[in-house]
Amino acid sequence: MARRLTLGVLLGALIMAGAIFACTPLSEDEPDPVTQSAAVVRPLTDTNKAFLFVANPFFDVLYRVDLDSHHVRQRPIGEAPHDLAASADGRYVAVASGGSRSVTVVRSEDLVGRTVRVGFAPRDLAFSPDGASLAVANYDQSSVTIIDTGDFGQWEVPVGVGPISLAFDPTGAFLLVANFESDSVELIDMAERRPVAEWLDAPVEMVDEGGVVDVDDDDDTSDDDTVDDDTADDDTGDDDMADDDTADDDTADDDTADERPAKLDLVTGLDAIDRPQVVTYGLPDTPSEGVILIGVRQAPEYELDTTRADSVIALRLPDGMDLAEYVAALREDAAAAPPLRAQIVEAGVNPRALVWTPTGDTLFGLFYAADEFGTTTNVLSELEFGPGGLLRESKRIAVGRNPAAMALSSDGLMVAVANKDDATVSLVDAEDGSLRSVGTEEQPFALAYRPDTDELFVAHRIPLMPVTRILTDEAEAKLIIETLSVGEFVGD
């Protein structure tokens, strides 16, 4: 039977847990990725323990809930905290606070740490694989701050305009940065503490365009009454796509189709990627090894154009080369280096989150798409590797309104999506695609799975609302849904 939380302090603390940078909806000119907003960690000093961390942007505190005793501890942090991240080994938790241009880094076992000043509008956070470094994307300062988690030393690396998403390679030697406003994906050499200049000159070879492509030339051919084979003579039509049957397709005569840029324009080079807002790196020793995924947001004039399918770019390193070897080849002679192989993946539009399963052979993403009636909805897409190592969408499942968070169970077999406007959580079986919608308290806003039990914890944005605990009872094949009851409040 569901039980109410007994502490009003905690109930208020969990409102808007791990909130994104702004409470109001972003304009179509701004990036819109889903923010990692809650974490369950198991500290190295006691792996039998598990703590749920949430941040309260109204009271400017970080709360740690012991998931066994339900005791709660708190720590003051910067103003308007939003983005939260945990190191892979569970030692550290970090929170970005946009109101005070600061990041708080604490040890999970005792909440001891420090709040440090960073750049304007800190957005994404990323720990290096060993937890020794924390990267912070300063969106309004066109820079990335790197923090040493041992001595809290820091340095600032200038990058393109509007850094919004970060991803370390598995070795921690390099950091990928998606610059939303300057349309580029940069690579930072962590040892040299600067971007790899040659990276932006890396040759790119298109191996799969994905879907129907409308090829436009650099001259204003969109004003022409028809689209014919003459486009094969212009700059954008030199590739084989100009001869594809889609050039003569009836859609080429549609005014909307004529105005769309060619999909190849999205990835003519790493310094010319259309509005990247999510970047992630593949997992070692899996099919995704050496794969860089970039989610791009459509330009405002194509906003929610669900007839397009060019919102994910997959870049694969040359066979037999890791990222360090490829960077060395670029530095020796970028023009002679083997090309990155690029694929445009067919999925929905405006990817807001891209997450690999632990086996690295499947990816889940949150997108917009149109249903059979042409109504735009939110969908969870499953992408899998097919022939030739190309990613293909294998499942598309409609979820609720305004997804605010997505989480995968530790085995990757269950995907949860928090639907803020529906007061539901969508639970999707990754194997068969079956969907179960679970009603929760109002405005579920943050999700985290407990790795040792795969219990799902859901935090809510409305004041005086609890954390919902969802657990699958395998014996009775049913879900156990209850509100988290806590005991004595333990302050610092």
Image (cartoon, rainbow, N blue to C red):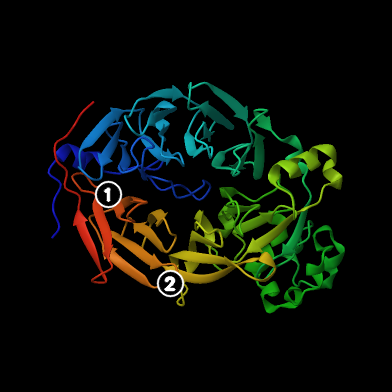
Q: Nearer the viewer, residue 428 or 210?
A: 428
Query: Residue at image x 65%, y 70%?
Result: 211
Please indicate, yes or no, whether residue 194 appears anywhere in the rendered image: yes
Please indicate, yes or no, whether residue 347 appears anywhere in the rendered image: no
Disc 1 is placed on an element classified as strand
* Precedes in sequence: disc 1 or disc 2: 2
Work out whether 491 lies above or below 454. above
Q: Where residue 333 sits: x, y (%)?
A: 85, 40
Residue, disc 1: 460
Which amino acid is tagged 1? His
Q: Nearer the viewer, residue 117 or 474?
A: 474
Bin the neighbour count of mark 1 within 10 Å (Cα to Cα): few under 14, some 14-19, many 20 and up.
many
Q: Where residue 133 sits: x, y (%)?
A: 53, 31
Bin the neighbour count of mark 2 within 10 Å (Cα to Cα): few under 14, some 14-19, many 20 and up.
some
Disc ID at residue 270:
none
Query: Residue at image x 85%, y 69%?
Result: 230
Residue, disc 2: 433
Q: Where residue 310 sits: x, y (%)?
A: 62, 62
Which amino acid is tagged 2? Gly
Given this view, does label 1 or label 2 mark the residue nearer the observer?
A: 2
Disc 2 is placed on an element classified as loop
Q: Where residue 101 sits: x, y (%)?
A: 44, 27
- Quadrant position of the C terminus in the picture: top left
Distance from Cα at disc 1 to Cα at disc 2: 26 Å
